[in-house]
Amino acid sequence: MSRARKKNPNQDFLHLSTPETSQTSGETAARLPPLAATSDQFRGALLGWAIGDALGWPLEFATTPASEGWIKSFRPWRKRVGGRWWGYSEDITPGSYSDDTQLTLAVARCVKDGAIFDVERFAYLELPLWLDYQRGGGRSVKAAAKSLKRRPWYANFYNAKGISYTRADGNGVAMRNLPIALVFHRSLPEMALYTFQNTISTHGHPRAYLGALIVSVAVAHLLQQVPSGPGKLTEAISTTLDQAVEILKTVQGEEPFRSQFFRQWVDYPGQASQSYIDLLDEELRNAKSQLEQISQFCSRPPIAWYKHLGALSWPKKSEAVTSANIAIYLVERHCDDEHPWRALEEAVTQVGSDTDTIGAFVGGLLGARYGLTWLPDDLATKVQDAAYLEHLGEELFDRAKQVRGSVADAHGVLVKQDSRADWKEKRKGWEKWIKDFAQNATPGLVVPHPALGEGKVTSVGVKPTGRSNYVTKVVDVLFKTGQTCRFHMRYKIGE
Ligand SMILES: [Mg+2]
């Protein structure tokens, strides 16, 4: 592998934390460094993300260690889907990815031409419709997706079956924010604000935001070839985290929606009158303290760091900051190795940890740094939807060229009129369509999906459930874009 280093524009990136107001237009904009990253790095990040997810997913709930050579190839496996009454066994084909990559693709479709993240499209279209084809989705994201049918994305205060919005601190945002990190990697104000919008549509605890920021800021530094050497990556992340949180503080409460989020958050039962920002500050100190300790653990076996963070048991193993800092540790430990692949191997084989999500983080981070060169061909071509992932990498690279460094761009989406009512109206049509689709799907049927575009049904299967009068219909669809999805719809026999 070529180990050539590029010019280090890291200082330029850090410089972005201070938005400047133009004397002529009055618009707040940051000075952008030149685009030094390549489309190879974007494609490598997306493919690495999906490969890490696909290698780690079969071991997500494993209790026995991975077999020798686990990460040399993809293999078929079987998964129990659903609970006691509605569950069934599903054969998972080699190289299949899970919710981490599915939602990353959904977010990528929401970064529109002109480099704008359309949070409403994500919250009101992509996320609710993902429920029909989700694979391995987390409880908070699923609860959030259902809740968005009734609540606005900026005040999605759900509380269902013990899952509460203000306590949601899991990986659900960090595992889907890669497109925002890639596109806005030169503009910290936009990255910080769009990541915040992406976060609060599903997760109300500041740890969810910080976990997503840590991974995203790391992607940005690695795209720009952060200086190598022990402790350099963690140092750069730590400094940029401070700057990102400061940016959020300077704009909080500026628009009506934000006032509502912060006000409703502090008034929510159980918050002990602590504000979101106060708790964010507290969690930021904890996250930075962990980052500072990484270099002391780099020469020790990874298990020591996992145990130190509590990443092998609940509830810590599912927390976003924990997972992010495990991934940063693995990348810091191996990033300058001759074969950085070792970082991914350690991530996806650490049974007892969140292997698919941490695998996705590590794969994405190494891809951001090294592009496609570090990926074994056998996996890069065989991971599910490889061609679509590469295509999206190119598309996001084009979006990154369009970034203007304007905070107004990030605000623009927020201050426009809330279009929730329009989306609600459209959704009635989709829901009817999904119901018809479930009943009538046959191989060859052309599918006009509202979020995924046109596709064709490739196979249809019926699975018995724990209730004798109900079955689950499993429908595979290949979309024109190259994405494949397995829809699963339960219905009563005879209806
Ligand atoms: Mg997953």
Image (cartoon, rainbow, N blue to C red):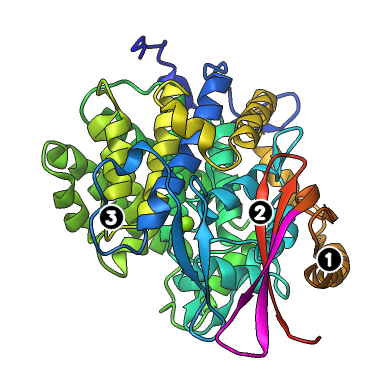
Report the residue at 23% width, 49% height from top: 289
Can see residue 173? yes
- Determine which residue is flagged by label 1: 430
User: Are the residues flagged by discs 3 and 2 in contact, CB closer than 8 Å?
Assistant: no
Vertical placement of residue 376 versus 105, above or below:
above
> Eyeballing the image, is 65 above or below 108?
below
Give the SS element for disc 3: helix
Which type of secondary structure does the marked residue at label 2 adopt?
strand
Disc number for residue 286: 3
- Residue 357 higher or lower than 61, as above or below: above
Local crowd size for mark 2, using a 10 Å CA cut-off: few (<14), some (14–19), many (≥20): many
Type of amino acid at the residue the image marks with label 2: Cys
Q: Return the disc, 1 or 2, that comes first in the chain's sequence.
A: 1
N-terminal-most mark, 3 or 1: 3
Q: Position of residue 62 (x, y in %)?
A: 31, 62
Does the segment drawn in magenta span residue 473?
yes
- Which span is picked out in magenta? 458-475
Check disc 2 and report the residue beneath it.
485
